[in-house]
Amino acid sequence: MSTAYPARLEFDADRRISRWRPLVQWLLAIPQLLIAQALSSLRSVLTLISFFTVLFTEQIPRPLFDMIAMTYRYEWRALSYALFLHEDYPPFDFEPAADDDGVEPHTRLSIAYPERLNRWKPLYKWFLAIPHYVVLIALTIAAFFVVIGGFFAVAFTGEYPLGARDFLVNVYRYSLRVSAYAGLLTDEYPPFALAA
């Protein structure tokens, strides 16, 4: 791509993970994952509101957009910890902002705010995203096996394999781009690519 996609995800944590962490880190992540699930439900409601604001005004009010972006950021921080991609416990940070606030330096997620959106795209974006959802199903199945492999790699070597970790980050990035498009946060069609 010549320009960066509006939904951006960066990850640069140390690959060295304590060998015991895969055994318990998912358990420590449960409070974070429960909050992320609640925020996901909130995001569904906010996306429904966004549907009507785009339809009638061709934009999403900035506070609404910032809140939706925050739900994705919180979800990524919780999920990356639960999958033992890093050791730092994610903060309970609920600052609504489209740009990453830098509270968690290893996991950065930002979504560029669009000044104008196409009024009619909310009516058919979900349909255009179907091929991406098919790809995401295959990627999610592959990611499941990569997580299992990563579990054993960390348990025996104390290091997350770079290729496996990058694959998981790229799958979430791909998912974020599809969600941002189908969730009305951008009109730019997501590329069929895992790379940044």
Image: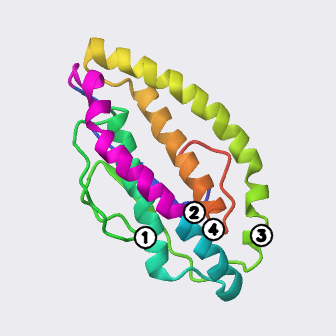
Looking at the rendering, which quadrant does residue 86 occupy? top left
Residue beneath disc 2: 3
**Residue at (37% x, 44% y) in the render:** 33
Q: Report the front residue among 63 and 150.
A: 63
Q: Are marks 4 and 1 in contact (CB under 8 Å)?
A: no
Residue beneath disc 1: 67
Amino acid type at mark 3: Leu
User: How far, Cα to Cα, is label 2 from label 4?
Assistant: 19 Å
Q: Is residue 124 left or right of residue 8?
A: right
Residue beneath disc 4: 184
Label 3 SS:
helix
* Depicted 141 relative to depicted 117: above or below: above
Q: Decide which of tag 2 and tag 4 comes sooner along the chain.
A: 2
Q: Decide which of tag 3 and tag 1 comes sooner along the chain.
A: 1
Q: Main secondary structure of the magenta part?
A: helix
Q: Whole-percent x and y of residue 119?
A: 73, 80
Q: Decide which of tag 4 and tag 3 comes sooner along the chain.
A: 3
**Residue at (66% x, 60% y) in the render:** 182
Q: Whole-percent x and y of residue 41?
A: 50, 58
Amino acid type at mark 4: Leu
